[in-house]
Image (cartoon, rainbow, N blue to C red):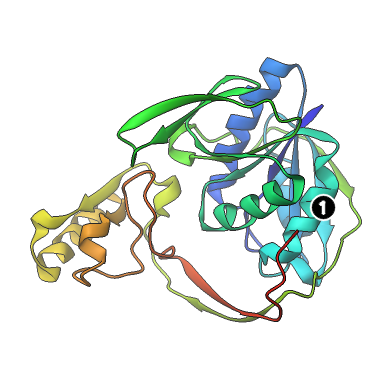
Amino acid sequence: MAVLVVAEHDNQTLKPATLHAVTAATEIADKAGSEVHILVAGKDCRGVAEAAAQIAGVAKILLADDAAYDHGIAENWGPLIVGLAAGYSHVLAPATTSGKNVMPRVAALLDVMQISDISAVVSPDTFVRPIYAGNALATVQSKDAIKIITVRGTAFAPAAASGGSALIETVEPTGSAGLSEFVRAELSKSERPELTSARVIISGGRGMQSGDNFHLLEKVADKLGAAVGASRARSMPGLCRMTTRSARPARSSPPSSMSRSAFRARSSTSPG
């Protein structure tokens, strides 16, 4: 069975984190003797599907174009991915804010364990992932028929964005689940790369002592074209921006500095 990657995008461009997830998927597919497919779900996003079709090593693009997928609402994406999952042995997504939002819901609906934040592929059913705030690495094996995985982008090189010629196939959308609706997005523009896919990260903790000192890191980051991270010890007291993600690998962190989306829940009904 093939391996499916859930693409991350903004309906116009494919996010770099997707390329890292494709590399992980390719490693799994090579070891299992299968192929890699990519799901592009969104609204008016065929351009993204065409870009995904150019990624080297990808055999097929599944395009789900519907207003329900416009803003990446997990309650709407979940049923779509679950409906497709039966045809795949693995479903992967980048371990970004979006991936961490939708994939646990998919795992719950499929009644399987999620394998989070993998940093290496040992075999089609065995993976390496960080534990204890990144201070140790665990090798885990899953016996689930469908493996739901999030991928640590910095652990895998990006797949080549050109050279492929994948077939684009339209899939039937499942539409809105009626549980949530998009209200607004507050976007923070930055020339710096996203933390989850940056080649260089400048990070600070208690040693910076003050917010003014922390801003020195931002100046260094701008010189190096790096992303800026902070330990939770720095962000919790408010000494640096709460929108700066923690650079500690496996700790909970504030929202991404790239975007924060607000949603209004219509119902407290659980996804299952």
Residue 265's place in the image compared with 32, above or below, is below
Residue 236's place in the image compared with 156, above or below, is below
The answer to whether residue 95 shows anywhere in this view is: yes
Q: Quadrant of residue 239?
A: bottom left
The answer to whether residue 11 shows anywhere in this view is: no
Q: As shown in the figure, which amino acid type bears the numbered disc 1? A: Leu
For this view, does 252 lie left or right of residue 30?
Answer: left
Residue 183's place in the image compared with 34, above or below, is below
* Disc 1 element: strand
| Nearer to us in this view, 130 or 183 | 130
For this view, does 72 lie left or right of residue 237?
Answer: right
Decide: few, some or many residues near mark 1? Use Cα within 10 Å; few <14, some 14-19, many ≥20: many
Estimate the x, y position of residue 252 in percent, counting from the top left: 39, 55
User: Which residue is rendered at x = 82% and y = 67% of the image?
Assistant: 66
Estimate the x, y position of residue 205 in percent, counting from the top left: 17, 54
Estimate the x, y position of residue 26 in percent, counting from the top left: 65, 27
User: Which residue is rendered at x = 82% and y = 47% of the image?
Assistant: 62
User: Which residue is rendered at x = 84% and y = 45% of the image?
Assistant: 84
Q: Quadrant of the N terminus?
A: top right
User: Which residue is rendered at x = 8% and y = 62% of the image?
Assistant: 209
Q: Which residue is mark 1?
A: 63
Estimate the x, y position of residue 160 in percent, counting from the top left: 59, 34
Q: Quadrant of the C terminus?
A: bottom right
